Image (cartoon, rainbow, N blue to C red):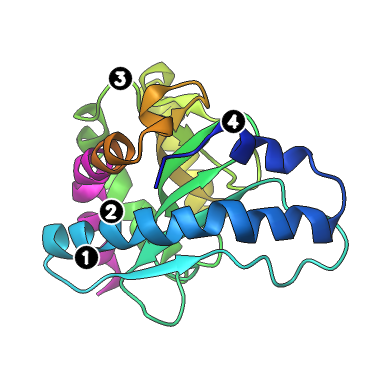
């Protein structure tokens, strides 16, 4: 099975919930299942703990079609939103690879405080790492462009504002050969997750 083609990204140009969801289910979700199964196995080995694959169902949507879709990998079999989790997904103009801490997370404050106490961890990440403060929006900012104070303020907001989020990872364009080649994409995503693992482990220790 191939990676993601331009046809997959064009799914988000389809009008109407039914048409777009059918295309997501038929075109994209089988690839999520295939790629996600490999990544889940890899992450389980890296972390030394069983991880579980979840594929976004968009079940709550009744009218508006989704602007993006994703797979998530977490240490919980029943769900991922209340847990630190890894994502791989598509908007119409990019593929995203995230370590995600979204607003449903009960331990947000504890995790943010751990990160604030270990800010040096962020300086070890590669130059192509980006940060998003809202998983619903396409925008992401290069981590390298954050001053220490900006990073601190983003984490304080994540801690103190109920709906605030913190996602760290990478973006790839639809034209990138890594996106279009399944084996390269799995390898690239695995290395990205590996790079983000110290942040995941720190967050999980705050959960204990």
Tag in front: 2 or 4: 4
Q: Position of residue 64 (x, y in %)?
A: 84, 56
Element at badge 4? Answer: helix
Q: Are marks 1 and 3 in contact (CB under 8 Å)?
A: no
Could you tell whether 70 is left or right of 37 in the image?
right
Residue annotated with mark 1? 205
Q: Quadrant of the C terminus?
A: bottom left
Query: What residue is shown with label 3?
Result: 127
Crowd rating for badge 1 (residues with CA inside 10 Å; few <14, some 14–19, many 20+): few
Q: Magenta residues?
A: 190-208
| Residues under numbered marks 1 and 2 in contact, where contact means CB atoms less than 8 Å apart | yes
Determine whether the residue tagged by mark 2 lies in a helix, strand or loop. Answer: helix
User: Which element carries disc 1, helix, strand or loop?
Assistant: helix
Regarding residue 207, the answer to whether it shows in the image is yes
Within 10 angstroms of label 4, few (less than 14), some, or many (20 or more) residues? Answer: some
Snapshot quadrant of residue 21: bottom right
Q: Upstream in the sequence, badge 3 or badge 4? A: 4
Q: Are marks 2 and 3 in contact (CB under 8 Å)?
A: no
Nearest the viewer among 119 and 13 is 13
N-term-proximal mark, 4 vs 1: 4
Q: Which residue is mark 2?
A: 114
Residue under pointer 4: 6
**Rounded to the nearest whole Å, what is the CA distance between mark 3 and mark 4?**
26 Å
């Amino acid at each position: 099975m191939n990676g993601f083609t331009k046809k997959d990204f064009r799914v988000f140009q389809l009008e109407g919930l039914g048409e777009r969801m059918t295309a997501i289910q038929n075109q994209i979700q089988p690839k999520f299942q295939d790629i996600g199964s490999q990544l889940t196995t890899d992450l389980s080995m890296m972390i030394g703990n069983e991880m579980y694959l979840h594929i976004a169902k968009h079940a709550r949507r009744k009218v508006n079609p989704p602007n993006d879709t994703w797979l998530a990998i977490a240490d919980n079999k029943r769900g991922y939103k209340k847990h630190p989790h890894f994502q791989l997904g598509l908007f119409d103009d990019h593929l995203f690879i995230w370590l995600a801490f979204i607003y449903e997370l009960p331990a947000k404050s504890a995790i943010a405080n751990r990160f604030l106490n270990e800010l040096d961890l962020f300086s070890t990440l590669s130059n192509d790492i980006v940060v998003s403060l809202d998983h619903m929006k396409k925008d992401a900012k290069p981590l390298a462009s954050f001053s220490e104070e900006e990073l601190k303020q983003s984490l304080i907001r994540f801690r103190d504002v109920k709906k605030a989020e913190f996602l760290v990872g990478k973006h790839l364009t639809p034209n990138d050969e890594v996106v279009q080649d399944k084996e390269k994409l799995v390898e690239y995503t695995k290395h990205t997750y590996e790079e983000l693992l110290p942040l995941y482990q720190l967050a999980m220790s705050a959960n204990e």
